[in-house]
Image (cartoon, rainbow, N blue to C red):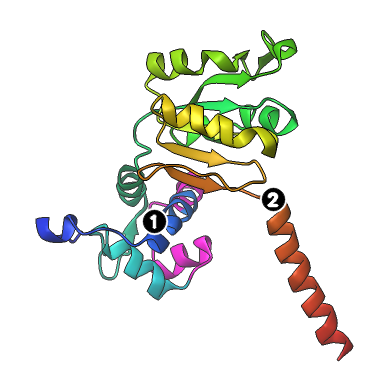
Amino acid sequence: MTTRSSAEAARDIPEATVARLPVYLRALTTLAEAGTSTCSSEDLASAAGVNSAKLRKDLSYLGSYGTRGVGYDVDYLRYQIAREIGVTQDWPVVIVGIGNLGHALANFSGFRSRGFRVVALLDADATRTGEEVAGVRVRPFDDLEDIVGEHGVAIGVIATPAVAAQDVADRMVGCGISSILNFAPTVLSVPAGVDVRKVDLSIELQILAYHEQRKAQGETA
């Protein structure tokens, strides 16, 4: 395997590449579970849904170009990507808002297998306190600061209604959470240094509806 120089290693990876690294990791995990030990760039690109030139360019930022005539060592590349995106360690996560979506997120088995551990479920509704979801007891939202301090939480998930999301984000930031995954249908305002990823399922469906409409119009024409 080819290794980058220290100067190259210090170079930032483009955001578009960062966004694709988890996709490559998932594809490699699937290949490994199927018993595949090595794969070509074409095979990995196909499994990840990208073209092979883009994949090779992305992986060049990690310093891994594979071996000519052999391809990529699946287990080695899995580890390399997992280390680059930080999921070789255990990340404690707190979920706020235990409605239907919060329940689904708490029960998502992919958190644990991908390096994330849900340490607390919080809700402002006192009637939910003590409820157990996926083996974790729901606690009052006012316990947030204590939980963040106890577990060193850096990642928070917001699954509340839109009207409550900004207040939740403010509390998260105030007690040291610096990365937020927001499922609430609203735009959050956070200070510099805090990363927010927004997941809006209705927008994704609307985008699909647009493409379906275009296809229907094309068939009519």
Name the residue type under label 2: Leu
- Measuring from the top left, give residue 45's x and y in whole percent: 46, 66
Name the residue type under label 1: Val
Asked whether residue 126 is in view, the answer is: yes
Q: Against 4, is 200 above or below?
A: above
Q: Against 88, is 3 above or below?
A: below
> In 3D space, how far apart are the residues under numbered discs 1 and 2 (Cα atoms)?
22 Å
- Measuring from the top left, give residue 168's x and y in whole percent: 56, 30
Q: Is mark 1 on a helix, strand or loop?
A: helix
Q: Which residue lies furthest to the right in this view?
A: 220
The quarter of the picture where residue 191 lies is top left
Q: Give the magenta part as a residue range.
A: 28-50
Number of marks drawn? 2
Q: Mark 2 points at which residue?
A: 201
Q: Please rate how many residues cluster around mark 1, counting C-alpha atoms within 10 Å: few if below 14, some from 14 to 19, many from 20.
A: some
Left or right position of 38 against 171: left
| Image quarter of the N terminus | bottom left
Q: Which residue is drawn at 75% across and 30% down?
A: 100
Among the two numbered marks 1 and 2 on one chain, the one whose residue lies closer to the N terminus? 1
Q: Which residue is drawn at 46% across and 42% down?
A: 190
Front-most of residues 171 and 70? 171
Q: Which residue is drawn at 52% across and 13% down?
A: 143
Q: Are marks 1 and 2 in contact (CB under 8 Å)?
A: no
Q: Please rate how many residues cluster around mark 2, counting C-alpha atoms within 10 Å: few if below 14, some from 14 to 19, many from 20.
A: few
Q: Name the residue under label 1.
A: 18
Asked whether residue 3 is in view, the answer is: no
The label on residue 165 is: none
Q: Residue furthest top?
A: 130
- Measuring from the top left, give residue 207's x and y in whole percent: 70, 65
Front-most of residues 207 and 91? 207
Instruction: Based on the picture, tell me whether residue 29 belongs to the magenta stretch.
Output: yes
